[in-house]
Image (cartoon, rainbow, N blue to C red):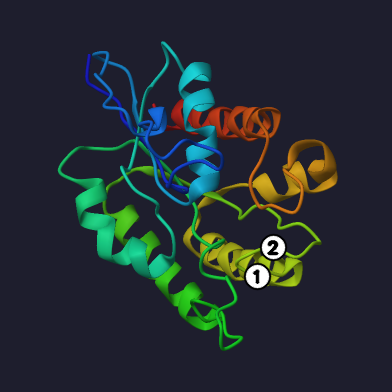
Amino acid sequence: MFRRFVLILAGASLCFGQDAATPNPAFRKIEDTPNLPRVLLIGDSISIGYTEPVRAELAGKANVHRIPTNGATTVVGLKGLEDWLGSTKWDVIHFNFGLHDLKIMDGGQHQVPLTDYENNLRTIVQRFKKTGARLIWATTTPVPDAKVNPPRRSADVIAFNAAARKVMDESGVAIDDLYALVKPRLEELQLPANVHYSKAGYDVLAHQAAQSILKALESHF
């Protein structure tokens, strides 16, 4: 039986509240179970938060890996793509960039302008398509209607998601709408005045991400 592989890209840094002195389990080395898909999560800290529950949900169904850093902006993604993809064959790539791109800098501009964000995503998708993998785009999750540091605006999340959806629709990339999933439940799932989530929130995000991966796998084989 041939080996199957999954790559999930979405966000990577230490999870909110993680003790900096304690290694984050999201970054642990995964020993593959033969003949199971391999999953790699790439993106911002939101995906770091749901890495471990995705692993738990896909136990016995996929080997869940992730990049060993914060995927951050699309600029960082473009620089890291080759190292992140490596020489391994992937079957499914589940990815996100946006929460860092739309961050408001000291001069009032986005960290990555919207037009550049869209162009960067198009380049990233083109590179992913060369892998032959099934691609899944995860929409950027909402920001609270509260003062957050660094500053982010709800309207920008909508605009950046719209630009990303345009790219994905053009390229035939499946969309995992995490934004729509949690938007009605922010008070329940998101930490107060924070872009990050409670354990329950990450579990909700993880369940949908895992289900989107399984769906892609079913259509891939």
The crowd level at tag 1 (other Cα within 10 Å; few <14, some 14-19, many 20+) is some
- Tally of numbered discs: 2
Query: Quick one: SS at disc 1?
Result: loop
Residue ID for mark 1: 151
CA neighbours of label 2 inside 10 A, class few (<14), some (14 to 19), many (20+) = some
107 horizontally vs 159: left or right = left
Which residue appears at 22% of the width and 20% of the height?
A: 2
| Dot label at residue 103 | none
- Residue 40 horizontal side relative to residue 175, left or right: left
Q: Position of residue 183 (x, y in %)?
A: 78, 48
- Tag 2: residue type? Val
Please tell me which residue is depicted at 25% across the width and 19% down the height of the picture: 32
Q: Is residue 26 above or below residue 187?
A: above
Q: Is residue 104 above or below residue 68?
A: below
The Cα–Cα distance between marks 2 and 1, rounded to whole angstroms, is: 5 Å
Left or right of 145 in this view: 196: left
**Residue 54 pos. (x, y %):** 51, 26
Q: Are marks 2 and 1 in contact (CB under 8 Å)?
A: yes
Please name the residue shown 82% across and 41% down the image: 185
Task: Report the amino acid beneath label 1.
Answer: Pro
Question: Percent position (x, y) of residue 209?
Answer: 56, 34
- Locate the N terminus and report the quarter of the image it occupies: top left
Residue that extends furthest to the bottom in the rendered view of this protein: 107
Query: Between residues 66 and 215, which one lies in front from this camera angle?
Result: 66
Secondary structure of residue under mark 2: loop
| Quarter that holds the C terminus | top left
Residue 42 is situated, as x and y percent measured from the top left of the image, at 40, 46
Q: Quadrant of residue 163?
A: bottom right
In this figure, which residue is indicated by the disc labeled 2?
Answer: 148
